[in-house]
Image: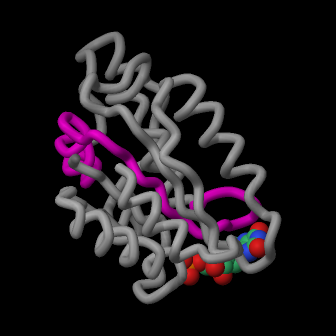
Amino acid sequence: MKILVLNGSPRVNGNTASMISVFREEAEKHGHQVIEYNVCRMNVKGCMACEYCHEIKPGECVHKDDMSKIYAELKDTEMLLLASPIYYHGISGQLKCVIDRFYSALYPKAPETLKKVGMFLSSGDPDMYVGAKFSYDGDFLGYLGLEDGGIVTNHDENAEAKIRKMAASL
Ligand SMILES: Cc1cc2nc3c(=O)[nH]c(=O)nc-3n(C[C@H](O)[C@H](O)[C@H](O)COP(=O)(O)O)c2cc1C
């Protein structure tokens, strides 16, 4: 399975990065292809709501920036893994910007190949996940109808074991 990981943490050795590294190790052991982008190291502009992607050139964003790399991956990705620290009760702004830009590629429908989604979250305090989970449930499971690969947070008991189980069961 081709898995696209979008890392929304700027901290190279942070909690989100550690969770991704466990996931990658286990998923690759099971023969999956894991492609990761640290979106904090990319130049991705905010969605302009200009509707160019729906009304002028369907599927094509008016911005020409690093998002083109993610659009190319999304064409045949089978699972999307959204990974982020919690900033002010939600995912990081860098990852939110990328998700808003999904508008040209995943709205109104995701590519046929994209079937599954998962999420890793990391915060300072526990129980800080309501905002991020709301968007995951509403946008990715509800609206896009993707299969739930699960959410793991850095406050979960046995988070590493949970991540390994998630990766092994794909
Ligand atoms: C701008 C900013 C906002 C933050 N907001 C919250 C917050 O609302 N709640 C919380 O528990 N932690 C908050 N934190 C702490 C981070 O979520 C926490 O340190 C997290 O584990 C960092 O993950 P990382 O190591 O993967 O980058 C914030 C940190 C930053 C830099």
Residue at figure coordinates x 41%, y 20% from the top left:
51
Q: Is residue 32 magenta?
A: no
Look at the image and name its color scheme: one colour
Position of residue 52 in the picture relative to residue 161 (left or right): left
Report the magenta residues as a range: 65-92
**Which sits in the foreground, 158 or 132?**
158
Residue at figure coordinates x 34%, y 10% from the top left:
55
Quadrant position of ligand 1 = bottom right
**Which sits in the foreground, 29 or 115?**
29
Residue 73 found in image quarter = top left
Query: Where 31 falls versus 38 (above or below)?
Result: above
Q: Is residue 71 magenta?
A: yes
**Which sits in the foreground, 58 or 127?**
127
Image coords of residue 42 (percent x, y): 32, 64
Query: Where 39 falls versus 18 (above or below)?
Result: above
Residue at figure coordinates x 64%, y 41% from the top left:
135
Residue 38 found in image quarter = bottom left
Residue at figure coordinates x 30%, y 52% from the top left:
4
Tally the numbered discs.
0
Residue at the limit of the structure toward the top, as seen here = 55
Image coords of residue 47 (percent x, y): 45, 38
Image coords of residue 61 (percent x, y): 29, 32
